[in-house]
Image (spheres, rainbow, N blue to C red):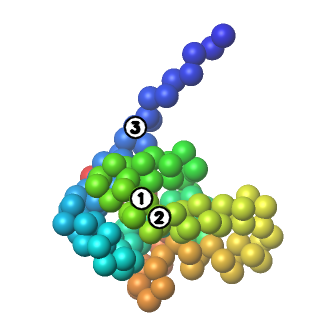
Amino acid sequence: MTAIDFALSELQQSLRVAIEKICARFGDDYWLERDRDGIFPDAFHRALAADGWLGVCIPQAYGGSGLGISEAAIMMETIAASGAGFSGASAVHMNIFGLNPVVVYGSEEQKRRMLPSLSRTPGLKPRSSRPAPSVAATAT
């Protein structure tokens, strides 16, 4: 029987560090207030969008980072562990996992129409026309 290595790769460790840095800007007081008032954590959502993280599972050809579901799961785990809990994770869940069926099974037309807009927040201007930043560039 072959042993399974569950250790994170260097890329996955860099992803975790990059997400931790964003989450550190949103402390317990921010999340307690969101829990109390029930308002969507827009500032947190926009912070992840600004750095290209909402497109973590979207292929680079459609404006995403081109990483996989494992990296997205690490991202979600890191968000939840930061103190954001379910409120933080659920705020970005649909952006990250919602259109994976389109990535895997969608037609080219569906991918061109749906994927680029989901990788960023409506009304947020992309920093450039280039694909979302790589994990290595964001984590340093």
- Cα gap from disc 2 to disc 3, whole angstroms: 26 Å
4 in relation to 113, above or below: above
Type of the residue with mark 2: Ser
Q: Residue at x 51, y 23 (%)?
A: 5
Dot 3: few (<14), some (14–19), or many (≥20) neighbours within 10 Å?
A: few
The label nearer to you, 1 versus 3, is: 1
Q: Which mark is residue 57?
A: none
Label 3: element kind: helix
Q: Which mark is residue 90?
A: 2
Q: Residue at x 77, y 67 (%)?
A: 106
State the residue position of label 1.
86
Work out whether residue 119 or residue 11 is closer to the camera in this orientation and state it: 119
State the residue position of label 3.
10
Type of the residue with mark 3: Glu
- Cα gap from disc 2 to disc 1, whole angstroms: 6 Å
Cβ–Cβ below 8 Å for labels 2 and 3?
A: no
Q: Residue at x 54, y 68 (%)?
A: 95
Quarter of the image holding residue 11? top left
The label nearer to you, 2 versus 3, is: 2
Q: Residue at x 62, y 66 (%)?
A: 98
Work out whether residue 41 or residue 120 is closer to the camera in this orientation and state it: 41
2 in relation to 7, above or below: above
Quarter of the image holding residue 89? bottom left
Percent position (x, y) of residue 37?
31, 78
Residue 78 seen in the figure? yes
- Cα gap from disc 1 to disc 3, whole angstroms: 26 Å
Residue 18 seen in the figure? no
